[in-house]
Amino acid sequence: MNHPEDLYTLDDAAPTVPAGLHLVAALTGFADAGSAVAQITASITGSLETQLVAEFDPDVLLDWRARRPVITFEHDHITAVEPPRLTLHLVRDELGQPFLFLSGYEPDFQWNRFVQAVTDLAEDLQVVDTTWVQAIPMPVPHTRAIGVTVSGTRADLVESMSVWKPETQAPANVLHLVEHRLAGLGQQVTGLVLLVPHYLSDTEFPDAAVAALSGISAATGLIFPTDAMREEGREFLARVDEQVAGNAELQRLVGTLEQRHDTYMEGNPVASPLTGADGQVPTADSIAAELERFLADRRSAAEDD
């Protein structure tokens, strides 16, 4: 029999996990605009106290040829191999509050078993709620705060935080299925989908990570280190603004996005913050082309550093 618990191994040195913790989930794979998920994962696992609780089996869940391990090659030999990992850690936030953090790759295979495994773990570990985060590219301006679409069972968070509440069909992230399963079981669950400017979606956009951590904090009360990210975000946006100021066409495109965003936020009859009355938006290619020089300069500066 293929039991869900066969997908993961509990760590021998795993601590006794107290009941009533928050579960936070952030998986890369389908979409990670602005590298928001990658950045918060690096921040949480790199700056906070963590202890491994469980690790999922990549031989069962992963398409290795699509997401190959990273090797380090030095002159004539391999010195390290870094395979993708999908793990559950016990973490303590900046105030020492414990929570569970599910992070790593989004599975390529065995989705139903994986969803069951996650919901079983949530039940076995008696988590109080689950919060997951994703970031998707949207035609919104970088000059406005990053918006979020909130889903799940927390009506208070939907009311206070959700900027865009569409009625639509879209490809699912595996965590959408986890949310649906948990909600069906009567568990508290919140999904946070960040709306990141599409012309910055291929960059490492610090403000996207700050918005993700802020959303998690609002849902759970957990406190995360964001000072360094906020400073990096200010420098990043200053360089973007410099490029915009020097290009009249880009100024017009960003200005159009700002107008549509502000009209929507004012409660006027616009169907979406992403489009105007004509239903048209600047294309990703048109804006991305204008920022090509900025991105090239940014990569060059990173290489120099």
Image (spheres, grey):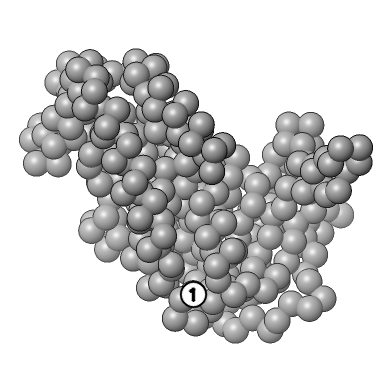
Q: Position of residue 270 (x, y in %)?
A: 14, 30
Q: Residue at x 47, y 41 (%)?
A: 204
Q: Residue at x 25, y 27 (%)?
A: 244
Q: Residue at x 50, y 56 (%)?
A: 40
- Could you tell whether 95 is left or right of 2 in the image? left
Q: Position of residue 163 (x, y in %)?
A: 25, 46
Count up the numbered dots: 1
Whether residue 169 is visible to the viewer of this picture, yes or no, is no
The N terminus - image quarter:
bottom right
The foreground one among 55 and 146 is 146
- Could you tell whether 184 is left or right of 5 in the image? left
Label 1: how many Cα within 10 Å (few below 14, some 14–19, many 20+): some
Q: Is residue 274 above or below residue 6?
A: above
Farthest front residue in view: 304
The foreground one among 179 and 292 is 292
Whether residue 45 is visible to the viewer of this picture, yes or no, is yes
Q: Residue under circle 1?
A: 93
Q: Is residue 51 above or below residue 46?
A: below
Q: Is residue 137 above or below residue 181?
A: above
The C terminus - image quarter:
top right
The foreground one among 163 and 179 is 163
Mark 1, secondary structure of its residue: loop
Q: Position of residue 231 (x, y in %)?
A: 35, 55
Q: Quadrant of residue 41?
A: bottom right
Three-letter amino acid code at disc 1? Asp
The foreground one among 136 and 178 is 136
Q: Position of residue 108 (x, y in %)?
A: 70, 39
Q: Residue at x 37, y 24 (%)?
A: 291
